[in-house]
Image (spheres, rainbow, N blue to C red):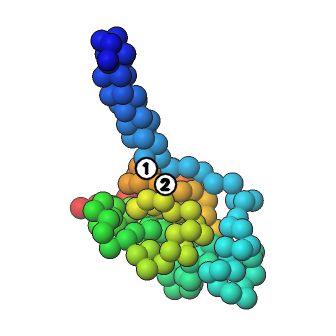
Amino acid sequence: MDPLPALVVGLGLPAVALVAGFVWRARDGRVRHLDRRVGIPAAAASAIRPGRAASASDAERLGLDDDALGTGATLVQFSTEFCSRCPGTARALAELASEYDGVRHVDVDLTHRRDLAHAFSVTQTPTVLLLGADGRATARAAGVPRLDGLRAELDTITGRPRVRHHA
């Protein structure tokens, strides 16, 4: 092999991998605001709960009853048994939820629920959905979520600032 193509391949592939890694890291955990007008397709909704209306809220599609939901918002964490980052994320989300009145954290194990993973397009764990008081998703983060982004969304959804706990 000629030295020039070998040099290009030898230096080019690691450079491409480095750029791809930086792009992945920049997107991982970023909180994305969701368009509330776009819902889960009717076919996916009926696969989760046969006979249910396609207009059911995300909370209903997840099988969450009113007791599991917060009155202001709910942080839904999708996890699996083998996710190494999920326990730390669960602790951080539970602490974040405790900073707000009416906000709860719910963990949904997808290990044996591929239907939910497919219906909510979960390709990595942890993935977090932020549900409003009406049970519809308003924001989403794939990977370990950035807490400042979730706080900003919670401030908007709940319409009130965090509750400050004094130690």
Name the side, left or right, on which 52 lies relative to 92. right
The picture places residue 4, in percent across and down from the top left corner, at: 34, 11
Residue displayed at 49% across by 82% down: 68
- What element does badge 2 sit on? strand
Name the side, left or right, on which 63 lies relative to 8. right
Determine which of the numbered discs, if any, sits on residue 141 in the image: 2
Is residue 118 in view?
yes
Q: Residue 46, located in which quarter of the rendered image? A: bottom right
- Disc 1 to disc 2, how far (Cα)? 5 Å
Asked whether the residues under the numbered discs 1 and 2 touch, taking CB atoms below 8 Å apart as contact, a structural biologist would say yes
Closest to the observer, 74 or 25 = 25
Image quadrant holding the C terminus, namely bottom left
The picture places residue 162, in percent across and down from the top left corner, at: 45, 58
Quick check: 97 above or below 54? Answer: above
**Residue tagged 1:** 29
Q: Residue 20, located in which quarter of the rendered image? A: top left
The picture places residue 137, in percent across and down from the top left corner, at: 61, 64
